[in-house]
Image (spheres, rainbow, N blue to C red):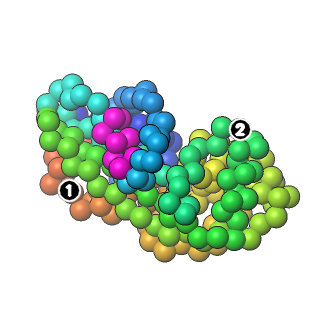
């Protein structure tokens, strides 16, 4: 059985579009960042925490996390409207990085991987920022935005689109030896 340890609608849609049948069993974890914790160390810790302890060695577990990094600081999901405005004002007209990390776990073995995408924002004023927030409600997204949002804040990107959506798809696809048995099984069961 293939098990996704996330309720992210974007991750669920990406895996569904790839033809996987899977169960969603999220982990409720503390996502607080430790003092002076490096951004990639935080990302890997979140993925490992979401995977948790292996429940069944016959299952393949997938966990993922996405962070937005500006000037070596993580801009987490906004806590409310004003925090969303603050985050988007901080990024307006500037460049930042989006890191999505994931882990595949079978038995006690975990394969952690991540991708980085460079993003440059449009130079927006506060009226444009508030209009975007009211239209798109980006409160469940790291950095308070979605690359897929119509008339969103992203001006340019350098790297993977799906990585910014929350899943390092290229790196996942490169690990086909781990997930292919579960994908083929999904196709046969649909059959």
Identified at 74% across, 71% down, the residue is: 123
- Give the structural element (helix, strand or loop) at label 2: loop
Identified at 52% across, 52% down, the residue is: 74
Q: Main secondary structure of the magenta part?
A: helix
* 43 or 158, nearer to the observer: 43
Image position, residue 116 (x, y; %): 41, 64
* 154 or 42, nearer to the observer: 42
Q: Which residue is mark 2?
A: 80
For label 2, the crowd category at 10 Å Cα-Cα, with few meaning under 14, some 14 to 19 and many 20 or more, is few
69 falls in the magenta region: no
For label 1, the crowd category at 10 Å Cα-Cα, with few meaning under 14, some 14 to 19 and many 20 or more, is few
Image position, residue 36 (x, y; %): 45, 48
- The N terminus appears in which quarter of the rendering? top left
Q: Which residue is mark 1?
A: 176
Identified at 64% across, 57% down, the residue is: 149
Q: CA distance from mark 2 to mark 1?
A: 39 Å
Q: Is residue 29 left or right of residue 77?
A: left
Residue 191 in view = no
């Amino acid at each position: 059985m293939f098990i996704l340890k996330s309720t992210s609608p974007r991750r669920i849609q990406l895996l569904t579009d790839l033809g996987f049948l899977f169960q969603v069993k999220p982990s409720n974890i503390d996502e607080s960042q430790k003092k002076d914790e490096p951004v990639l160390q935080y990302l890997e810790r979140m993925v490992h925490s979401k995977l948790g302890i292996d429940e069944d060695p016959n299952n393949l577990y997938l966990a993922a996390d996405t962070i937005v990094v500006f000037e070596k600081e993580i801009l987490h999901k906004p806590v409310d409207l004003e925090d969303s405005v603050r985050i988007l004002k901080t990024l307006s007209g500037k460049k930042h990085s989006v890191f999505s990390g994931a882990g595949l776990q079978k038995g006690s073995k975990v394969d952690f991987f991540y991708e980085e995408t460079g993003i440059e924002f449009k130079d927006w004023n506060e009226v444009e920022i508030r209009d975007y927030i009211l239209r798109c409600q980006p409160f469940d997204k790291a950095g308070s935005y979605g690359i897929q949002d119509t008339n969103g804040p992203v001006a340019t990107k350098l790297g993977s689109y799906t990585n910014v959506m929350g899943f390092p798809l290229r790196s996942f696809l490169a690990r086909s030896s781990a997930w292919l048995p579960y994908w083929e099984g999904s196709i046969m069961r649909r059959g």
